[in-house]
Image (cartoon, grey):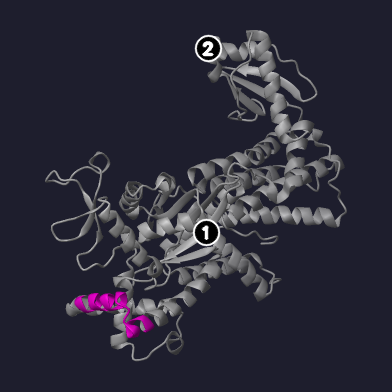
Amino acid sequence: MSVQKLNETILNKIESAAEKALGQIPEPLELDFPPNTELGHFAVGCFPLAKQFRKSPAEIAKIISEKITPDDVIHKVNASGPYLNIRLFPGVLFGEFCSEIISKNTKYGESSVGKGIRGMVEYLSPNTNKPLHLGHLRNGALGLSISRILETTGHRVVKANLVNDRGVHICKSMLAWKRWGIGSTPESEGLKGDHFVGSWYVRFAQEAVENQTLEDDVQTMLQQWEAGDPETLKLWETMNTWVYDGFAETYKNFGLEFDVFFYESDTYKMGKDVIQKGLEEHVFSKDDHDNTVFHLPVAEFGQEKGGEAKKVTLLRPDGTSLYITQDVATSILKIEEHKLYFSIYVVGSEQEYHFKCLFQILDALGYEWAKDCHHLSYGMVYLPEGKMKSREGKIVDADILIAEMKKLAADEIRQRDSEGRLSDDEINHRAEKIGIGAIKFYLLRVRPAQTINFDPAESISFDGFTGPYCQYAYARISGILAKAQNSGTDLEGCDFSLLGNPEELSLLQRLIQFPEEIHDAAQGFNPSKIAVHIFNTAKAFNQFYNKHHVLRAGNETLVTARLALIKATAIVLKKGLNLLGIEVLENM
């Protein structure tokens, strides 16, 4: 019997009892879990039936429970207030779920909810005037995880990176290098390309404090770029290439994946054309300063103090475009080029108003798919020094943080390897996966909208609500299974009837809930649902393992059944961590 068939059998039995006792087929019911395993294995709330049968949920539950006869699947049903608590025979409960998880392996938790639905997750969106920082790592972790979760629910996901490769901020790095670089390169200075270019962005900010004319000069350079000045374009291409080389290295180190790249330099002219057409069709208008603007609906955006509708500037009087101009064009390009049903933008919470305006503009232009555009807003990442400011060079550099986390992980591994059995290569291999996993888990363990105070020491801990804690639980199970395999233990034909203590039930409950957690995470674009569930699964395993033997359980039948239970647990842990972009280790 499959798990789905088992669920249907339980619900059909309850529905039949309800029809027999109350005279008609009840409204559809759902299986849930009681607050603790002592009450039962499953629970069904009778609240939806109150209106139908004109009785209290508690009375309905009592009536139905008296009409259910135990069989070879259901051991016992009793009413507890408005709930029906159902207890199955352990052999059926553990046997069906563990067998299905082991059989499906990496496919466990997958569904076809999103079959045929193609969408895009646009994330990271770096500027080519500076290296990636901790905020980008949160963005990247979110984007990758959401993509994987949606793919697991059957969606076809295009992972996109919109590169902000033009504009005033880019020209600031270019102008600074042109004035003071004296032919230097990343190679001559021994720096990654993105770090090298970022140093000139900081230099510009420092020089501009004393020299106000630099701001005018950088505007002139932007106009030269937009006019196609060969010298300016050549410098722009050279410096961007340096940055892309640096970005690629960070993407690889942090495990980020992209299917397609968009570049603002390719879409800004298209944006102008879209705005011009909208102007001709009276979607947009000119203000008193000759800006092309869009007047926002008062009902949704309110009014200015003078009583006028709020407005968004789309083109400056000199014809140059703004961020939102490119975003309008890129949004259209993405949908049409990739035939998307939905588009998710992973961008910080400070841009919430921007995206609200963008989607309103797209709707005003007549694009029905604007309603399927979603801004996945996430909170800032703070450190003891406060908010990061890249123009002042006060950022937590992504590369430095990754290297530091690897070092912290390596130090922890060496402390645990007191006998010095591990080679430096093996330590570095483990440290890389533990360090990266620690960062990702820490950034994903809370809801996206929540701000984070990042604590490297806490994140790398092997104890507590951390990535290494979950990875270690998987590694511990892997070690047990390896020993069992070496001793010739066979998991085929397990007898699960001996299982059923509170710790085993609590662990199994986590495994059963996993597919639902994936579904909820996909619906809410919320990877923290997975992170919390995987942590609780690892915790439930540790509680079980600390209290009960597996290989030394004494009874060969019990040993085999417990091995199957922890093998199913390992599958869920690995799958869940993978959905967070975290790799597992067989040994830690």
Q: Horizontal and vertical percent for residue 582?
A: 59, 58
Q: Is residue 159 visible?
A: yes
436 lies left or right of 95 = left
Q: Is residue 386 visible?
A: no
How many numbered circles are shown?
2
Q: State the residue position of label 1.
A: 159
Q: Is residue 225 magenta?
A: yes
Q: CA distance from mark 1 to mark 2?
A: 50 Å
Q: What SS does tag 2 mark?
A: loop
Q: Residue at x 57, y 53 (%)?
A: 148
Residue toward you, 106 or 81:
106
Instruction: State the quadrant of the N terminus.
Output: top right
Q: Horizontal and vertical percent for residue 151?
A: 59, 51
Whether residue 155 is situated above or below residue 277 in the rendered picture: above
Amino acid at pointer 2: Ser
Image-quadrant location for residue 503: top right
Residue farthest toward the right in the current orientation of the protein: 488
Q: State the residue position of label 2.
A: 56
Instruction: State the quadrant of the C terminus.
Output: bottom right
The span shown in magenta is 216-234
Q: Horizontal and vertical percent for residue 370?
A: 40, 47
Whether residue 182 is situated above or below residue 86 in the rendered picture: below
49 lies left or right of 353 = right
**Upstream in the sequence, badge 1 or badge 2?**
2
Residue toward you, 455 or 109:
109
Q: Residue at x 60, y 29 (%)?
A: 32
Q: Main secondary structure of the magenta part?
A: helix
Q: Horizontal and vertical percent for residue 123?
A: 46, 59
